[in-house]
Amino acid sequence: MAGDKQELPVEDLYRRYGPMVLRRCRRMLHDEEEAMDAMQDTFVKVLRYRDRLSENGPSSLLYTIATNVCLNRIRSRSRDRSTPVGHDLERIAGYEEHSERALTGHFLDRLFAEQRPDTRDIAVYHYVDGFTLEETAKMAGLSVSGVRKRLRRLRETGLALKES
């Protein structure tokens, strides 16, 4: 029933979710002008692909697109040596020693390897962005108990990996 699928109402989404997307971009980029550009890029992507996207969970969709747009901007910044590396990129890198970064990356790869693909998003929403369980559940399209279960499993896996 691909013919029955309606395009996303991008203008309505912009009015309703624009402030949320802008907050996300500001939080990740720490630069007002760049955050505004990233917000616009987010909605341009929605506009470009609106015929392929579903209206289910628009806030989660927009949050994910905005996050990806911002991460791409941070990566681009780090490749461009003339632009100072942002605070978040330094925090993501975390450690000064290359070996410590490699070990941390390896640990995270192992931690999330056994999890469902969207568990990483749930962990970022709750632990990094500070969303409540209810907000995280809404963003992920799950129940609060489903989010609790995923986070509990993630913690148990992390503890087991630390012990081994």
Image (tube, rainbow, N blue to C red):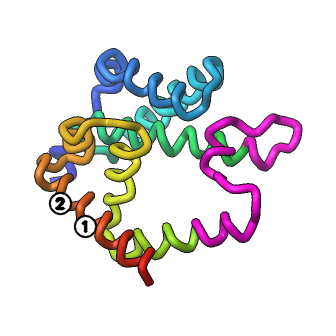
**Toward the viewer: 37 or 128?**
128
Magenta highlight: main SS: helix
- Which residue does the numbered mark 1 point to in the structure image? 153
Check the image and report above or below for 15 versus 10: above
- Depth order, front residue of 120/33: 120
Magenta-highlighted residues? 77-104
Q: Circle 1 — which element?
A: helix
- Locate the N terminus by quadrant: bottom left
Q: Amino acid at mark 1?
A: Arg
Image point (60%, 49%), residue name: 92
Residue 89's x, y, as percent? 66, 44
Give the left or right position of residue 12, taking residue 39 as reference: left
Q: Is residue 94 among the parts visible in the rendering?
A: yes
Q: Which numbered dot is residue 120?
A: none
Residue denoted by label 2: 149
User: Given the image, on which type of amino acid does mark 2 rest?
Assistant: Lys
Q: Residues within 10 Å of mark 1 (few under 14, many from 20)?
A: some
What residue sits 41% from the left and 38% below the top?
A: 129
Judging depth in this view, the residue of 123 and 33 nearest the camera is: 123
* Residue 82 picture quarter: top right
Secondary structure at numbered mark 2: helix
